[in-house]
Image: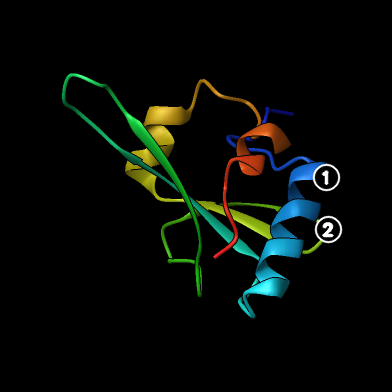
């Protein structure tokens, strides 16, 4: 059995669920990577209204982490998304 491309930890799923509820949005977290420049890549996390047909999806406790194919190629070396990263995400 092969390792999944992306994983959403239970603690990160709990945090996303809390943020989504406060913003009255679905519990779908999109990870996108903007590339290039002197600073390298920028990783963006935002709540999404829906997943795209070509997204890779990880689901934990009813919360989805979705990543487009190009961004997935850029983060493939990362095996998990930690709740520490999500703690930086400010609720809006």
* Marks 2 and 1, how far apart at CA: 7 Å
Q: Nearer the viewer, residue 24 or 34?
A: 24
Which of the colour schemes (rainbow, by chain, secondary structure, one colour) is used?
Answer: rainbow
Label 2's element? loop
Q: Position of residue 14 (x, y in %)?
A: 81, 54
* Lateral position of residue 1 relative to residue 34, left or right: right
Local crowd at mark 1 within 10 Å, few (<14), some, or many (≥20)?
some
Label number found at residue 10: 1
Please identify the residue farthest to the left as the structure is shown: 37
How many numbered callouts? 2
Return the disc, 2 or 1, that comes first in the chain's sequence. Answer: 1
Label number found at residue 61: 2
Q: Eyeballing the image, is 21 above or below 3?
A: below
Q: Eyeballing the image, is 27 above or below 70?
A: below
Label number found at residue 74: none
Label 1's element? helix
Q: Which image quadrant: the N terminus?
A: top right
* Lateral position of residue 15 relative to residue 85, left or right: right
Classify residue 71 by image quadrant: top left
Q: Eyeballing the image, is 71 above or below 39?
A: below
Q: Nearer the viewer, residue 64 or 42?
A: 42
Residue at 24% x, 33% y: name it: 35
Q: Position of residue 40 (x, y in %)?
A: 27, 22
Q: Position of residue 64 (x, y in %)?
A: 65, 58
Q: Are marks 2 and 1 in contact (CB under 8 Å)?
A: yes
Residue at 57% x, 48% y: name it: 89
Residue 82 visible in the shown view: no
Residue 11 visible in the shown view: yes
Q: Which image quadrant: the C terminus?
A: bottom right
Q: Position of residue 59 (x, y in %)?
A: 71, 54
Local crowd at mark 2 within 10 Å, few (<14), some, or many (≥20)?
few
């Amino acid at each position: 059995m092969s390792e999944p491309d992306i994983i959403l930890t239970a603690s990160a799923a709990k945090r996303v669920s809390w943020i989504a509820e406060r913003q009255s949005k679905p519990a779908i977290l999109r990870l996108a990577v903007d590339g290039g420049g002197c600073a390298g890549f920028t990783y963006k996390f935002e709540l999404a209204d829906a997943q795209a047909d070509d997204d890779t999806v990880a689901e934990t406790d009813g919360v989805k982490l979705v990543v487009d194919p190009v961004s997935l190629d850029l983060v493939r070396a990362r095996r998990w998304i930690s709740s520490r990263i999500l703690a930086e995400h400010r609720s809006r």
